[in-house]
Image (cartoon, helix red, strand yellow):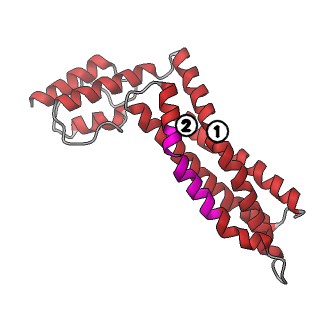
Amino acid sequence: GKIRHVALILGVVPMATLGGLIAVHLAGETLNMATAVGFIALFGVSIQNGIIMVANFRRVRGEGLALRASVLEGATERLRPVLMTASVASVGMLPAALATGVGTDVQRGLATVVVGGLVVSTLLTLFILPAFYYAMERLFERKGWGVRSRRDRDYLRARLLEANVACEVRQLDLGDMLWIARKRNVSGGAASSTATTTAAGAAAFVATAATS
């Protein structure tokens, strides 16, 4: 992955924190050890939803779709899995959040954070995260950051397919595809293993693999 995608995924943590704090305030709870444990569980589920969303954006983007189309299709495909993940956790914690019996103070604080936080963070993940991804990728494209490595990756992927490499190369990045080419026992230093490998060097490297 890329650092900007990692930062984007970690951006769901403030969203989840906002939802948890709102739920704690509305329920009249206090910030204590139980609610702290609830925030830990909330962050785990929220990060998982963010990974599901961003990973699908990258997969669809790797298939050659335009940025806007890839974001729309990726968000549509992952709408149901994200909702299912959040719904299972929320419904499971709902009885504990509504409990009023003796000894339920600890579990009520934990469950309140998880249920309320997931409601807010899921909505923000489904709508705000795709918008942030689109804005970030559009900025990088306008500035030209990472364009060369993406062109190298696309060109190398085509050459690997021409060489009949028996593997799924559509979801691999440039470094992985170069590693596959080297595993074919090709000698030569025409290409480097970094993401800044030139398209000409990658073409020469894979052309040697195709003829060996």
| 5 to the left or right of 105 | left
Q: Main secondary structure of the magenta part?
A: helix
Residue at the left extreme, as displayed: 212
Residue range in magenta is 74-89
Residue 117 drawn at (x, y percent): 73, 55
Q: Amino acid at mark 1?
A: Phe
Disc 1 + disc 2, Cβ < 8 Å: no
| 185 to the left or right of 177 | left
Q: Residues within 10 Å of mark 1 (few under 14, many from 20)?
A: few
* Above or below, 191 relative to 103: above
Q: Nearer the viewer, residue 39 or 100?
A: 100
Residue 67 drawn at (x, y percent): 49, 26
Label 1 element class? helix
Marks 1, 2: nearer the viewer: 1
Label 2 element class? helix
Q: Can residue 188 be seen?
A: no
Return the residue at label 2.
5
